[in-house]
Amino acid sequence: MEKYGDNFWYISLNNKRISNRNVISIQVKKNYSIIELSTEADPDIIDQCKLIYLGQGFFFDVEIQKELAKHVRLVARI
């Protein structure tokens, strides 16, 4: 049984929709999407959707928020 909060968080740089049974939630923004998965993403999905790993745990965990802020700043420059 999975522990609550052990989800994997990614940011997608091309806003492609993932049709995967492991997707828990997707937050679509203008230039990127935040994706929550119950398991790690497959390498082909990572390449296809240009996913960047943010971390594992709760969305508001400090490390996940730091990674998210870092990548959002980079996306804003593009």
Image (cartoon, rainbow, N blue to C red):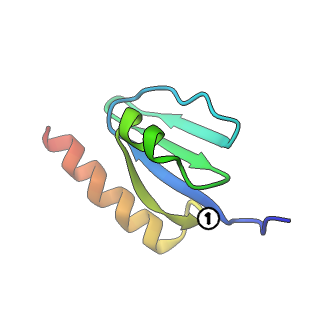
SS for callout 1:
loop
Q: Is residue 64 left or right of residue 52?
A: right
Amino acid bearing label 1: Phe
Residue underneath mark 1: 58
Location of residue 61 (image quadrant): bottom right
| Pointer 1 local density, CA inside 10 Å: few below 14, some 14–19, many at least 20 | some
Relative to 21, say whether 57 is above or below. below
Which x, y percent locates residue 38? 67, 52
Give above or below for 54 relative to 47.
Answer: below
Which residue occupies the foreground of this view, 52 or 47?
47
The percent coordinates of residue 58 (x first, y second) are 61, 64
Picture layout, residue 21 above or below residue 4: above
> Residue 21 falls in which quadrant of the image?
top right
Quadrant where the N terminus lies?
Answer: bottom right
* Residue 6 place in picture, x, y as percent: 67, 66
Which residue ends up furthest to the right in the rendered image?
Answer: 1
53 with respect to 70 (left or right): right
Quadrant for the C terminus in the image: top left
Examine the rendered structure and indicate whether residue 58 appears above or below residue 28: below
Residue visible at 52% across and 47% down in the picture: 42
Q: What count of labels does the image hold?
A: 1
In the image, 78 versus 2, the foreground residue is 2
Hey, which residue is sitting farthest bottom in the picture?
A: 62
Residue at x 40%, y 29% (from the top left corner): 15
Query: Horizontal placement of 68 versus 2: left or right?
Result: left
